[in-house]
Image (cartoon, helix red, strand yellow):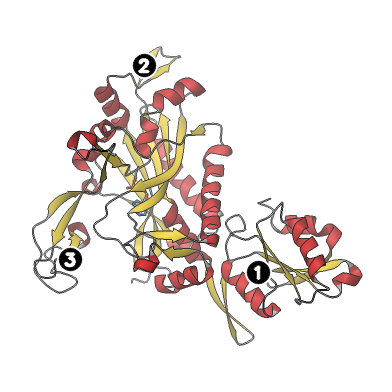
Amino acid sequence: MTDENPTAGPSLDTLASLCKRRGFVFQSSEIYGGFESTWDYGPLGVELKRNVKQAWWQAMVRERDDIVGIDASILMSPKVWEASGHTANFNDPLVECKGCRRRFREDELEAGAACPECGGELSDARQFNTMFKTFVGPIEEEAATAYLRPETAQGIFVNFENVLTSTRKKLPFGIAQQGKSFRNEITTGNFIFRLREFEQMEMEFFVKPGEDEEWYQYWRQERLDWFVRLGARRERLRFREHEAEELSHYSTGTTDIEYYFPMGWSELEGIAKRGNYDLTQHAAASGKRLDYFDEPSGEHIVPYVVEPALGVDRAILVFLLDAYEEEEVRDEKRTVLKFHPALAPVKVAVLPLSRKETLAPTAQKVADLLRPHYMLQYDDAQSIGRRYRRQDEIGTPLCVTVDFDTLEDDAVTIRERDTMEQVRVPVAGLLDAVGERLPEIG
Ligand code: GAP
């Protein structure tokens, strides 16, 4: 680590253990010993994931009139992957240890390195295509081969003409998509950082040739700002421009937004200039015209593309790492996830001070008042202190406590997660008071 590096968040083990304990992320097929590099989202994880996807969709589609969304299938004609170059080029260099038979990506090892596991000699590299193959229909034959998509982007390119004619969009405009992608990665690990089944949020922005550099700069900054707006720590983010030899087969320029993960700087999101590569390839392979009629000039042009591409799971990992804090409060350790309220899985917890029957009906009424508006938890188990700690640990921004005075004064206490400050508000004004404290959701 150099002096310039920021401090990293908690270790991945610490985070994974909190995620399991509180129901964010579970190992897939755990009762059978797990299944390598696949993870399941639990009751809180699924809320967090929906919120992250919703925040992206809001910023990329709903708040703009130059981007529309689609939802294409995971299974597509294998001709798509021939034309896009994935069948020929979507390869990683695979080396195998001649001793322990473990496999590694050669480009992740030092030149001439021995096996990182046992020190044995490594084989020469061979190119390994990371697309998952399957068969469509009952016969497992070459002609029935199909692939699980390795990126969502191609579903956008092959629908370019459909979207253009149905929406009558003018350049520049974008098409956005969220959905599962699959890669038969050689090396996985680091919790939910690199998975074989993951979700992507990608947007292809179509521009006039010659305008792509300007839009590339624009989207780099827009995407970085999106993370910061949602609570990511600016000092743990940086841009890294790809060297020419690193570029994907379709790219004429790529910037990674990198994040300082516990294992070091690594890619969080990629912003690529794809030129007119994909539309040209699909037009040639399909024989269909995939271009844009530019009325002012009377010319048909093949738009250039700028693509911001982000993994949902990787974004979730970053928001978890950046939210995580451990604090000393009255000689006790407080673990708190300081999520941006829009991302927090639970927005408000309603906590009756005691389990006594006298409080329960009033506390339930308070919960019923808030539940239609906010994701809510009702918790009456254990001491109030422990319940606050539990809500802190899952990142709930507000707790509303119903106590015995509530029965007299019809007021409740709102406790804020970050400051731990408490204020008394009348139940009649509770919805407004919560709304003021959670302005960006509702
Ligand atoms: N369409 C371009 C594309 O797919 P990429 O850099 O290969 O580009 C985009 O992937 C993003 O998808 C990455 O920045 C990362 O956030 C996420 N991603 C890629 N492979 C992943 C994997 N195996 N597990 C989790 N996320 C992954």
- How far apart are the alpha carbons under marks 3 and 1? 46 Å
- How far apart are the alpha carbons under marks 2 and 1? 56 Å
Specify which label sits upstream in the sequence, 3 or 1: 3
The residue tagged 2 is 300
Residue 417 got which mark?
1
Q: Position of residue 192 (x, y in %)?
A: 39, 61
Residue shown at the point (37%, 71%) measured from the top left: 3
Q: Is residue 269 above or below residue 173?
A: below
- Who is closer to the viewer here, 40 or 348? 40
Q: Is residue 150 above or below residue 211?
A: below
Residue shown at the point (27%, 52%) measured from the top left: 184
Residue 280 got which mark?
none
Q: Position of residue 364 (x, y in %)?
A: 77, 64
Taking 101 as reference, is 152 left or right? right
- Who is closer to the viewer here, 206 or 164? 164
Q: How many residues crowd mark 2 within 10 Å: few (<14), some (14–19), many (20+)?
A: few
Amino acid beneath label 2: His
Name the residue at the right extreme.
Answer: 408
Q: How many residues crowd mark 1 within 10 Å: few (<14), some (14–19), many (20+)?
A: many
The residue tagged 3 is 102
Q: How many residues crowd mark 3 within 10 Å: few (<14), some (14–19), many (20+)?
A: some
Name the residue at the front extreme.
Answer: 138
Amino acid beneath label 3: Arg
Q: Secondary structure at mark 1?
A: loop
Amino acid beneath label 1: Arg
Q: Position of residue 1 (x, y in %)?
A: 33, 72
Taking 50 as reference, is 157 left or right? left
